[in-house]
Image: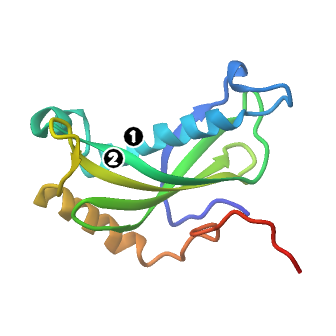
Amino acid sequence: MTVSPDLPEIWRERVRSEWCDYNEHLNMAYYILIFDHATDAFYESVGLDEAYRRASNCSTFSVESHTNYLAEVRDGDEVFCTTQLLDYDAKRFHYFHRMYHAGQGYLAATTELMGVHVDMTARRVVPMSAELQAAFGNVLDVHSRLPAPEQKGRVIGIRRR
């Protein structure tokens, strides 16, 4: 599978040698780190940035994730991520990252996430501001026209014939 032209690159970085394991490829924990960097970039793109967090005393927590490791990336490889917003409501956002090998264009991994908007004093899920909801709405207007990711909603299990 190659890069979809419909979603812009949101994050890019190079695999570091200290992130690689005894199999000589990126360790699973560091796929998550790279996806976390992409999450930060996505949040910033809709206004969930540091200034918002300071002004509102609200942040985000991830409450569920599902990662698919599809192809190896190795020490020194450059990767980039795209993000597709799948849905949102006043308190939650469901989104999907794809990680591609930058040099060869293949899909290396995906992760599907559910995030929530949290009041940091009460440590409770609370509604987002009208401005943030509008920003998510603008993104969803575009992203909802795209095909759903192949890996969306996958369940772990051994398939028997």
Do the CB atoms of the residues marked 2 and 1 lie less than 8 Å apart? yes
Q: How much space separates mark 2 and mark 1, taking CA atoms?
A: 5 Å
Task: Give the residue displayed 55% in from the left and 48% down from the top.
Answer: 81
Task: Give the residue displayed 65% in from the left and 67% down from the top.
Answer: 155
- Describe the element under mark 1 as helix, strand or loop: helix
Q: Provide residue 69's location: percent of width, then percent of height.
A: 72, 50
Q: Residues within 10 Å of mark 2 (few under 14, many from 20)?
A: some
In the drawing, does residue 16 fall left or right of residue 10? right
Q: Quadrant of the C terminus?
A: bottom right
Return the residue at label 1. 40
Task: Give the residue displayed 76% in from the left and 27% down from the top.
Answer: 75
Q: Residue furthest top?
A: 18
Q: Residues within 10 Å of mark 1 (few under 14, many from 20)?
A: some
Return the residue at label 2. 43
Q: Nearer the viewer, residue 100 or 150?
A: 150
Q: Provide residue 27's location: percent of width, then percent of height.
A: 72, 33
